[in-house]
Amino acid sequence: MEAAQAEGEDAVGMAASSTQERKAQSRTASIATAIPSTALPITEEPPHRRRKRLKEEAKAAEEAAVDAPLPLDASAQLSEAASAAPARSLRRTINTYLSLSKPRLAFLIVLTSTAAYSIYPVPALLSTTATAAPSLSTLTLAFLTTGTFLTVASANTLNMLFEPSHDAKMSRTRNRPLVRGLISKRSALLFAIATGVLGTGTLWYGVNPTTSLLGASNIVLYSFIYTGLKRLHPINTWIGAIVGAIPPLMGWCAAASQYSTFAPSSSATALQNLWAESRELLFTEQAIGGWLLAALLFAWQFPHFFALSHAIRHEYAAAGYKMLTSTNIPMAARVSFRYSLLMFPICILLTTEGLTDPVFVLASTGVNAWMVKEAWGFWRKNGEQGSARRLFWASVWHLPGVLVLAMVFKKGLVGRVWRGAVGEEEDEWEEDV
């Protein structure tokens, strides 16, 4: 009985104590809600920290974008289109053979030869009396572009034919048609022979033997010498630059032959006549413009190629290619910067030699300065932090930019267009050349 009473008293005491604790907690909570708190919720972020975080995220996204792999080239895209087409279909055949020619590269090479052809100083090009004004032959230009494209297609096909096992080791080249088995080696060889013979024959018949000889020499240089040296020594890049410098000479010779004083001698051999013609078209004072354009292309290829190859330098090394970006990145960056600086004197010489108006020097300075700026960043950052990718795209836009500016500001061209537009009398063309 007493025990039960004691337990009852304890229970009443505990209940009273619990009631008092609840009342105390309630009073504390009411006081806390009455006083405004200065502490921020955990999920809320201060504005200055949010701005800093967003800035860091944007910078990281930008670095990730510039370091991303470059998009597939035209040959890889055409190979994918060919593999997706039905077997033995016309679309599959066209895409396969077109991918062998590396059409984007071939188009760029044709552009350089066409630009040199148009920059050649023809008198009274856009005279108000257009019917009486001498001008370059449209038919010769058609032969030049067709023959140049065919010779380039032959060289590119032979290049792919010689190294499919090595192309398979690189992301940039593993989609080529021979690697994917879209065409047999025999068919590719026949295509290379056919385009080489047809291309050099077109240039010989429709342009002149000197231009045809230059096209044939490019096939040999690119397919047999450059391709072989890729696995032996980094000097292969310099040989490749010579290959890229020859097409402007082809365009220049195509234009110059239309005003050449050379006449084949019946008593001389064919080889003697060829040398006499080549000497007049390539080794006289009138050939300076062609050599300047060739120098422009030669110098441009170093920042362009080294920036392109930097992203896949490890793949080049794994495939056994001796590229300078795989063995000595600082040297490749220095070479890129030095050759990019040559753009300024070359553009100045194009004006001092009477090929372009003085305004061309000013117009080309901005484009040249852009590539020099990116080449400097490529050198200082050793190709890292997206500097290689920025230099690559600067070089992609630089070359067509300079060539188009040279064509637009060709010596006397703007003046002739203006006189033709306002109806003024044409001065004697000797004053403009």
Image (cartoon, rainbow, N blue to C red):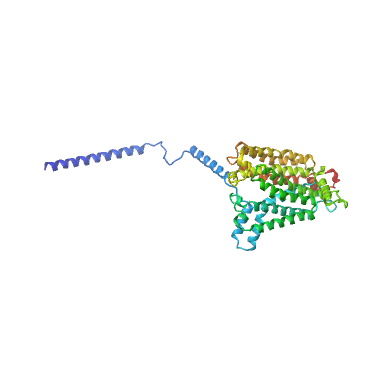
Whether residue 90 is visible here, answered yes or no, is yes
Total labels: the figure holds: 0
Q: Quadrant of the N terminus?
A: top left
Image quadrant where residue 178 sits: bottom right
| Front residue of this view, candidates 179 and 430 | 179
- Above or below residue 178? Residue 339 is above
Residue 66 picture location, percent across and down = 58, 44
Residue 297 picture location, percent across and down = 71, 44
88 sits left or right of 197 in the view: left
Instruction: Say which residue appears at 33% left-offset and 37% top-offset.
Output: 31
Image quadrant where residue 353 sits: top right
Q: Residue furthest left?
A: 1
Q: Residue furthest right?
A: 267
Image quadrant where residue 346 sits: top right
| Front residue of this view, candidates 174 and 46 | 174
| Front residue of this view, candidates 219 and 135 | 219
Residue 163 picture location, percent across and down = 63, 51
| Front residue of this view, candidates 354 and 71 | 71
Whether residue 142 is visible here, answered yes or no, is no
Q: Quadrant of the C terminus?
A: top right
Residue 131 picture location, percent across and down = 84, 54
10 sits left or right of 145 in the view: left
